[in-house]
Image (cartoon, helix red, strand yellow):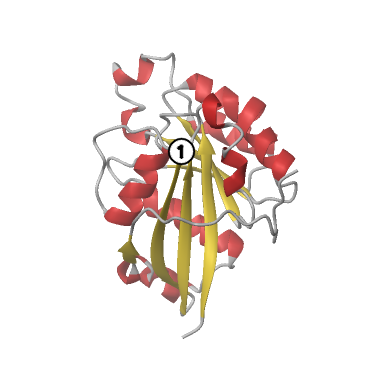
């Protein structure tokens, strides 16, 4: 059966939920403990339009300390997920002033989707206002248009709301839309596996280069 590999890289401020999003998608469980990431890789194998698709999911560090290391994950990326937390307005602002410019700088022709995380606590009056008023869906759409993202989507790693949709959108934009019949069966065809993968960082470029 024909297969292909799709590389997806997540970027965004530390603690916005990038790691939780990937682990919840791959392992069907929510990680309760927060451990800052440097580089982690996860795999998910799905059926898409009658083809086997191997998703290479790259988790990067959002902390300032790793700014020189993070771009090493960017070469050969098919699509980026630029993430912010809907209950952290500063992470929203940093998409515009830090993350979108960083991706554009290293990968001028990159495809990327804007993702609002922690959807499950937007309406929690206590949790959602620890860092200021939560970011609305309309504000997310406005930011998508400002930075030129292909889509704006929201999800919750804890509840699973919107989680599969995020990665379905990645495949739609990289591979193309799957027929309706196949699209409806995608979720039942998921075969997931995870693990930290040690990979050599190639400097050869397909869609992205280190400047």
Question: How far from the left and from the top, in percent, is residue 39?
Answer: 46, 44
Question: How far from the left and from the top, in percent, is residue 159?
Answer: 27, 42
Question: How far from the left and from the top, in percent, is residue 81?
Answer: 53, 45
The answer to whether residue 151 shows anywhere in this view is: no
Q: Quadrant of the C terminus?
A: top right
Q: Is residue 43 left or right of residue 68?
A: left
Kindly identify the residue that appears in the image at 55 percent across and 25 percent down. Answer: 64
Q: Is residue 30 above or below residue 132?
A: below
Give neighbour class at mark 1: few <14, some 14-19, many 20+ (Cα, 10 Å): some
Q: Nearer the viewer, residue 125 or 17?
A: 17
Q: Nearer the viewer, residue 2 or 194?
A: 194
Question: How far from the left and from the top, in percent, is residue 117?
Answer: 42, 36
Kindly identify the residue that appears in the image at 67 percent across and 35 percent down. Answer: 102
| Residue sticking out furthest to the bottom | 1
Kindly identify the residue that appears in the image at 40 percent across and 60 percent down. Answer: 43
Considering the numbered disc 1 on the image, is that residue within a helix, a strand or a loop? loop
**Circle 1 sits on which residue?**
38
């Amino acid at each position: 059966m024909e297969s292909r590999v799709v590389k997806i890289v997540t970027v965004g401020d530390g603690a916005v939920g990038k790691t939780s999003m990937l682990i919840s998608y791959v392992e069907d469980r929510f990680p309760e403990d927060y451990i800052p990431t440097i580089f982690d890789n996860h795999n998910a194998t799905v059926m898409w339009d009658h083809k086997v698709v191997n998703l290479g999911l790259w988790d990067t560090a959002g902390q300032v300390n790793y700014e020189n290391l993070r771009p090493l994950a960017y070469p050969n990326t098919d699509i980026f997920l630029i993430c912010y937390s809907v209950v952290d307005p500063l992470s929203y602002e940093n998409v515009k002033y830090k993350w979108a410019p960083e991706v554009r700088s290293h990968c001028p022709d990159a495809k990327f989707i804007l993702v609002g995380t922690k959807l499950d606590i937007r309406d929690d009056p206590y949790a959602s206002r620890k860092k200021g008023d939560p970011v609305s869906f309309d504000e997310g759409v406005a930011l998508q248009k400002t930075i030129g993202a292909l889509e704006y989507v929201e999800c919750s790693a804890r509840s699973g709301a919107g989680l599969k949709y995020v990665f379905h959108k990645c495949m739609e934009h990289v591979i193309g839309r799957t027929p309706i019949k196949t699209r409806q069966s995608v979720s039942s065809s998921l075969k997931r596996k995870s693990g930290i993968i040690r990979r050599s960082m190639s400097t050869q470029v397909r869609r992205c280069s280190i400047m």
